[in-house]
Amino acid sequence: MLEIATYALYLSISLAVTIWVGTTLFRNGRIFLVDAFSGNGQMADSVNQLLRIGFYLLNIGFIGLFLNTGDTPDTAGQMIKQLSWQLGVVMLVIGVVHLFNMRNISGMRSRALNRPQPVTGPVAPTVSPAPQPWPGQSH
C-alpha cells in the first residue's frame, strides 16, 4: 500500500511543480524573448510556445522514467526518504533545463544586440573631403 501512495505522491507533486514552473516561465519569459528577437513579438511567442512544449516533454518524460527508482518502502520513514530523493532529483533536472533555456535565450539576445541595426528615416548625405596628395608628391 505504501508503494502506491509513494507513486501517487511522487507523480502529483512532481507534475504539479513541473506545470507550475512551465507556466511561470512561459508567462514571464515572453519579455526576454521579445528582446532577444529585436521586438518581433510573433517570433517570440512562437519560440516561447515551443520552449514550453519542450520543457514539458523533457521533464514529464524524466518524471516517468524516474518513477520506478529505489526500493519499495516498508515504512512511512522509507517512503518520505524515497520521495525526498526522487523529488529532489526532479527539482534539479527542472532547474538544469531552466538554466539551459536561459543560457540559450541570453545567447540569442547577445547576438541580437551585436547585429547591426537598420537605419530608420532619411540618411544625411556624406561629404567626402577633397583628395590630398601623398607626402613628397606635387600637385
Image (cartoon, grey):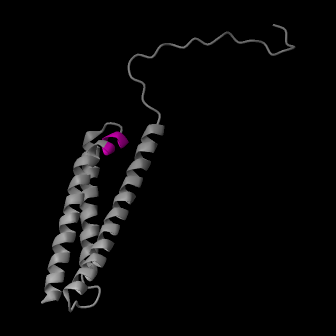
Residue at the far top in the pictured view: 139
Name the spot of residue 91 as percent of width and height, x first. Answer: 30, 67
Decide if residue 91 is on the left or right side of residue 131.
Answer: left
For the image, the number of numbered tags is 0
Instruction: Indicate the quadrant containing the C terminus: top left, top right, bottom left or bottom right.
Output: top right
- Residue farthest along the right direction in this orientation: 136
What residue is shown at x 31% (from left), y 41% (from top)? Answer: 34
Of residue 117 and residue 82, the one placed in the foreground of this image is 82
Specify the quadrant of the image occupied by residue 17: bottom left
At 25% from the left and 67% from the top, the residue drawn is 57
Horizontal relation, residue 91 to residue 104: left or right: left
Q: Is residue 64 above or below residue 134?
A: below
Which quadrant of the structure image shows residue 60? bottom left
- Where's residue 118, x and y in %? 42, 29
Q: Position of residue 88 (x, y in %)?
A: 31, 72
Q: Is residue 78 above or below residue 133?
A: below
Please tell me in which quadrant of the rendered image residue 101 appears.
bottom left
Of the pair 101 and 127, the residue shown nearer to us: 101
x and y percentages locating residue 130 in the rendered image: 67, 9
Classified by dominant secondary structure, the portion drawn in magenta counts as: helix
The residue most toward the front is 77
User: Residue at image x 78%, y 12%?
Assistant: 133
| Residue closest to the eye, 121 or 27 | 27
Image quarter where the N terminus lies is: bottom left
Question: Which range is magenta?
Answer: 32-37
Left or right of 116, for residue 98: left
For residue 84: magenta?
A: no
Q: Is residue 33 magenta?
A: yes
